[in-house]
Image (cartoon, rainbow, N blue to C red):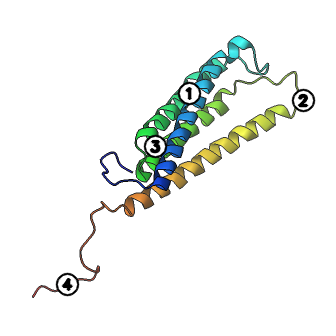
Amino acid sequence: MSLASTRVLRRGEREQVAGRRIGYLVAAGLNAALLWIAHQLLDWGWPSFLTGAFDDLLPYVTVSLAATMVVHLVWMMWDPAWFKHLAQLGLDLISVVVTVRAWQIFPFDFSGLPSWWEPVARLVIAVGIVGSAIGSVAEAVRLAREVDSSPSRPRASGTGHGTAAT
């Protein structure tokens, strides 16, 4: 529903919109909490396998969490389908960057733990990279389909067959 819409919502639609808005607010709040926690981890010394190199990854994590908060707050006010797909595509692309940087920086030291921890951590990051990339492509397709089916999209007149001038 757009901000300019003057259509009166029925009760079920109002409840659905209210539910989405509450969900967006909760998501923004959780991301704010995660952002605060991410900035405390090294000071807390937890988890023990996190190294000082996490400081190099932290700006990327910060951008990701802050962007997610902002998007959810905007969606509280305005969430047409095409815009949701566009914003989600942006968040997915940020996730690709963050996970690639996590792979490159790898701010973990598993020396005091079983030897399988490092390859498992690398595997989890690799799955995150691939999953975020696939999510980006899927979201781009959803966006293209939504824009293509938008009622405000200019349509060619006629049936698509050539017409002869008379």
**Neighbour tally class for label 4: few under 14, some 14-19, many 20 plus, Cα within 10 Å:** few
The label nearer to you, 3 versus 4, is: 3
Quarter in which the C terminus is drawn: bottom left
Judging by the rendered image, the residue that carries numbered circle 4 is 163
Rounded to the nearest whole Å, what is the CA distance between mark 1 and mark 3?
Answer: 18 Å
Secondary element at tag 4: loop
The front one of 11 and 80 is 11
Judging by the rendered image, the residue that carries numbered circle 1 is 60
- Residue found farthest to the top: 43
Q: Percent position (x, y) of residue 17?
A: 48, 47
The label nearer to you, 2 versus 4, is: 4
Nearer the N terminus, badge 1 or badge 3? 1
Secondary element at tag 3: helix
Q: Percent position (x, y) of residue 23?
A: 56, 40
Say which quarter of the image contains residue 37. Answer: top right
The front one of 14 and 61 is 14
Judging by the rendered image, the residue that carries numbered circle 2 is 114
Rounded to the nearest whole Å, what is the CA distance between mark 3 and mark 4?
Answer: 41 Å
In the rendered view, would you say 87 is above or below 35?
A: below
Say which quarter of the image contains residue 112. Answer: top right
**Type of amino acid under label 3:** Ala
The label nearer to you, 1 versus 3, is: 3
Judging by the rendered image, the residue that carries numbered circle 3 is 87
